[in-house]
């Protein structure tokens, strides 16, 4: 495949070189794109209280450390492979290089479904919390209008050059992290050593029968960190930026969630966490107590901007999967078009916006609740898909390095194997507790993970069809699209 067809998915060897994704991203910008997708504020407000109440209570801070160590093991192999494989295809390309082209096509389509569902869920959550925030100030803002506005702004940002999104996300992410760190500091100053009780890290507190549930909520808070490799083609120094950004993102997210949740334990008291009924209001109440009502209002607004940042980060991830699958004609080739001035995958972005809007509109027309139905259902579906893909990538690292002379006992075997084992356990927990995450007993909703399985099966069949009908094109699938 020539560079012309690689960039457009439909060009010829004799045509002029078309626009390509531009290398404008620094390591720092990739970190902000990744951390924003993990949405620190919404993770703290949404996932941490649930982990307290349904998981191991005061052991949640240590659970975040365990989750971080698991994903650091994943990152070791992921980073090692990123030094050899540079592609916007992300999981699709990595799995293709390590486990073969049929699984690559299956994973690419699964990734599109998982990230699109997650983006739709975040859009619904944004609408819900924007409506609540507006109502608390005497304003009327229907969630449908708020979600529609967020999707419109996301579409505009997706149409433009990616470094514009990175700069906006940097501002939003720094603001939400700053106020939560201020809350943590205020708790520490007022409570002294009691703000960070040692009991949170004792085996008796951490290793309870509900550790698995807490670990499940902790891993949900990391969704999006794995996207660093997708920005390789848009990075100035991909073999350095992608590994550094991956490690930095995992360490930042782990330290942030562990420290903030630890301060929450100290503020509430370790003995009262497992019985908390505040859930979504838990950290807002702490804001009232330790920082004052003005800070709580700021936290509510930053929760909305956090969700918007997550929406934009997830949209950017999903549209690049559409772009690559279009470039390799697994999906329609027009999705691979690059804007001549902004150098963005604008058609893939527009298609993704249309699908996300249709999902949200469908739930709205059905009269579904934007948070307890739309958000929880789509986020649960997306999380299952992403954790499954992470597990496959951990195994792909082992496959990729199996016969290479630069294989290493820790980086390319032991660490990925540990990660695959832990992620398989997490995937089992997610599937067995799917009704707990969605918050419904509806059999239709709780059968949604089968949609991921059907999508993967369709990908396997499509790969077999391509191999039969066009063997030459089949050999070009899931190859690195840029040289390290």
Image: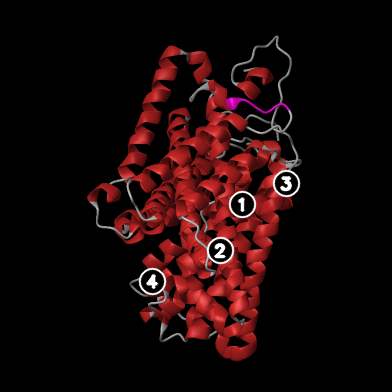
| Residue where numbered disc 1 is placed | 34
**Residue situated in front as seen by the camera: 49 or 222:** 49
| Residue where numbered disc 2 is placed | 303
Give the label, 2 or 3, closer to the camera: 2
Of labels 2 and 3, earlier in sequence is 3
For residue 281, side relative to residue 27 (left or right): left
- Say whether marks 2 and 3 touch (CB < 8 Å): no
Give the label, 2 or 1, closer to the camera: 2
User: Mark 4, residues whose alpha carbon is within 10 Å: few (<14), some, or many (≥20)?
Assistant: many
**Residue situated in front as seen by the camera: 481 or 145:** 145
Of labels 4 and 3, earlier in sequence is 4
Image location of residue 59, percent across then percent down: 45, 76
Of labels 2 and 1, earlier in sequence is 1
For residue 251, side relative to residue 458 (left or right): right
- Mark 3 secondary-structure assignment: helix
- Alpha-carbon span between mark 3 and mark 1: 16 Å
Give the label, 4 or 3, closer to the camera: 4
Image location of residue 54, percent across then percent down: 36, 71
- Mark 2 secondary-structure assignment: helix
Give the label, 2 or 4, closer to the camera: 2
- Alpha-carbon span between mark 1 and mark 4: 26 Å
Mark number, residue 55: 4
Of labels 2 and 4, earlier in sequence is 4
Q: Is residue 450 above or below residue 187?
A: above
């Amino acid at each position: 495949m020539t560079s012309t067809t690689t960039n457009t998915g439909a060009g010829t060897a004799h045509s002029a070189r078309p626009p390509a994704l531009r290398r404008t991203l620094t390591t720092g910008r990739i970190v902000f794109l990744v951390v924003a997708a993990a949405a620190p504020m919404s993770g703290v407000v949404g996932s941490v209280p649930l982990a307290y109440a349904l998981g191991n209570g005061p052991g949640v801070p240590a659970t975040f450390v365990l989750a971080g160590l698991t994903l650091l093991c994943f990152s070791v192999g992921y980073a090692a492979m990123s030094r050899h494989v540079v592609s916007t295809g992300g999981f699709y390309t990595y799995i293709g290089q390590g486990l073969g082209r049929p699984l690559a096509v299956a994973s690419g389509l699964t990734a599109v479904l998982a990230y699109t569902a997650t983006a739709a869920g975040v859009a619904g959550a944004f609408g819900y919390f924007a409506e609540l925030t507006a109502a608390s100030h005497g304003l009327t803002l229907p969630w449908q209008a708020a979600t529609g506005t967020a999707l419109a702004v996301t579409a505009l940002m997706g149409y433009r050059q990616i470094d514009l999104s990175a700069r906006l996300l940097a501002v939003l992410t720094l603001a939400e992290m700053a106020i939560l760190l201020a809350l943590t500091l205020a708790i520490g100053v007022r409570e002294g050593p009691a703000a960070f009780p040692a009991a949170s890290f004792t085996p008796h507190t951490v290793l309870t029968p509900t550790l698995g549930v807490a670990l499940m909520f902790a891993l949900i808070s990391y969704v999006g960190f794995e996207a660093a490799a997708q920005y390789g083609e848009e990075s100035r120094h991909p073999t350095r930026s992608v590994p550094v950004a991956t490690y930095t993102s995992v360490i930042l997210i782990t330290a942030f969630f562990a420290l903030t949740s630890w301060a929450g334990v100290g503020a509430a008291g370790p003995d009262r966490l497992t019985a908390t009924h505040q859930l979504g209001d838990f950290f807002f109440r702490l804001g009232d107590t330790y920082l004052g009502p003005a800070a709580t209002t700021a936290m509510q607004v930053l929760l909305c901007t956090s969700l918007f940042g997550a929406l934009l980060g997830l949209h950017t991830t999903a549209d690049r999967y559409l772009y690559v699958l279009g470039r390799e004609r697994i999906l329609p080739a027009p999705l691979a078009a690059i804007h001549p001035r902004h150098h963005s995958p604008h058609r893939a972005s527009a298609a993704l916006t249309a699908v996300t809007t249709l999902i949200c509109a469908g739930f709205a027309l059905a009269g579904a609740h934007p948070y307890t139905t739309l958000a929880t259902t789509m986020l649960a579906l997306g999380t299952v898909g992403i954790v499954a893909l992470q597990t496959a990538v951990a195994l792909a690292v082992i496959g990729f390095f199996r016969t290479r002379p630069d294989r290493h006992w820790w980086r390319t075997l032991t660490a990925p194997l540990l990660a695959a084992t832990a992620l398989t356990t997490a995937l089992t927990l997610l599937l067995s507790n799917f009704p707990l995450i969605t918050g419904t007993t509806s059999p239709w909703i709780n059968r949604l993970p089968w949609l991921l399985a059907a999508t993967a099966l369709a990908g396997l069949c499509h790969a077999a069809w391509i191999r039969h009908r066009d063997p030459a094109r089949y050999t070009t699938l899931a190859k690195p699209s840029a040289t390290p």
